[in-house]
Image (cartoon, rainbow, N blue to C red):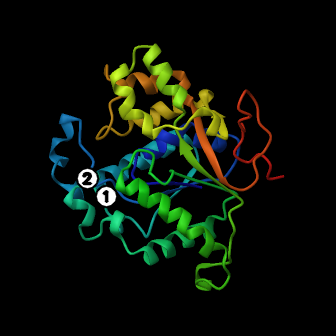
């Protein structure tokens, strides 16, 4: 089960992983915490959605439906129901504290909503962002807190028994960007040396990673999913993001294990190659 903040986050960060495990017959579920109502609309054909959070949220809910078809048989949940928690906007914006914003939602309500999904799905593996939300977005940080804060209550039979039988998730991972990716981006001319300082805090030293999922076979699925998000991304222009995602290496996705037993690994850093490794 993967927990992401907005539509398109799942494809960008974990799309190849989702497609791989779906193709292998695993049950893959996704919790999306907001509809991304405050995302920047980049396609001029969708200009009518700019400055219209309600309409944009509805449109992005349609985009994610089409995206998940490209990734396989994915069971998707809106945390608390569609539209319950709203996009909080970028860090420092007034919208962070607006009514309904996910970043400042009642923690007890968020926990209850997440426990309901955890107990319904009963995942062997759960995935979300690190404590900084990957790059500091308030909703990514809130998604991290939502999952991590619900793990204990979900496993406690005395917590809200009406939500279902208690479930203790065996393995939990945080998504991660390897530090070596920055070096390679500079070497290939995708990123300037001056830009490295801005990106580096959002990366993890390779030796601190625990897991690499090789989803290059499903890179095309990941690209197809991203192409459904016309409101948010353009992977066919000449920008850094487009160049990065079109590289087949974008099919490799990386994680840090934070709960559970690490399985056997490979390579110089002994990385796991399977999120289910060691579960028996």
Residue 203 x/y as whole percent: 49, 37
Q: Residue at x 53, y 33 (%)?
A: 221
Q: Residue at x 45, y 71 (%)?
A: 110
Q: Element type at marker 1?
A: loop
The answer to whether marks 2 and 1 mark residues whose Cβ atoms lie closer than 8 Å is yes
Q: Residue at x 27, y 61 (%)?
A: 96
Is residue 237 shown to the viewer in this render? yes
Numbered circle sitting on residue 38 = 2
Numbered circle sitting on residue 46 = none
Of the 4 image quadrants, the one containing the N terminus is bottom right
Between 118 and 81, the one nearer to me in the picture: 118
Q: Is residue 187 left or right of residue 27?
A: left
Is residue 236 shown to the viewer in this render? no
Quarter location, residue 244: top left
Quarter location, residue 23: top right
Residue 141 x/y as whole percent: 42, 56
Between 39 and 64, the one nearer to me in the picture: 39
Say above or below: 130 vs 148: above
Q: Residues within 10 Å of mark 1 (few under 14, many from 20)?
A: many
How many marks overall? 2
Mark 2 or mark 1: name the one nearer the start of the chain: 2
Q: Residues within 10 Å of mark 2 (few under 14, many from 20)?
A: many
Between 42 and 90, the one nearer to me in the picture: 90
Between 110 and 47, the one nearer to me in the picture: 110
Say above or below: 41 vs 159: above
The CA span between labels 2 and 1 is: 6 Å
Identify the residue position indicated by label 1 in the image. 87
Q: Element type at marker 2?
A: loop
């Amino acid at each position: 089960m993967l927990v992401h903040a907005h539509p398109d986050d799942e494809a960008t960060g974990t799309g190849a992983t989702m497609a791989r495990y779906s193709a292998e017959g695993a049950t893959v579920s996704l919790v999306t915490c907001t509809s991304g109502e405050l995302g920047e609309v980049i396609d001029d054909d969708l200009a009518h959605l700019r400055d219209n959070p309600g309409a944009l949220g509805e449109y992005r809910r349609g985009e994610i439906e089409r995206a998940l078809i490209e990734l396989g048989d994915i069971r998707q949940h809106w945390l608390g129901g569609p539209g319950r928690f709203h996009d909080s906007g970028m860090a420092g914006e007034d919208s962070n504290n607006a009514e309904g914003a996910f970043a400042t939602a009642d923690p007890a309500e968020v926990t209850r909503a997440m426990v309901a999904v955890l107990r319904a799905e009963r995942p062997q593996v759960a995935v979300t962002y690190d404590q900084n939300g990957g790059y500091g977005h308030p909703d990514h940080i809130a998604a991290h807190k939502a999952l991590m804060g619900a793990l204990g209550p979900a496993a406690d039979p005395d917590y809200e028994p009406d939500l279902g039988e208690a479930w203790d998730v065996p393995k939990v991972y945080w998504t991660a960007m390897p530090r070596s990716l920055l070096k390679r981006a500079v070497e290939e001319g995708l990123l300037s040396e001056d830009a490295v300082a801005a990106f580096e805090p959002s990366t993890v030293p390779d030796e601190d990673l625990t897991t690499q999922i090789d989803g290059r076979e499903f890179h095309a699925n990941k690209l197809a999913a991203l192409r459904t998000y016309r409101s948010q991304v353009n992977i066919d222009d000449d920008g850094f993001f487009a160049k990065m995602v079109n590289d087949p290496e974008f099919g490799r996705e990386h994680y840090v294990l934070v709960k559970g037993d690490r399985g056997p690994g490979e390579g110089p850093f002994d990385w796991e190659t399977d999120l289910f490794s060691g579960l028996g």
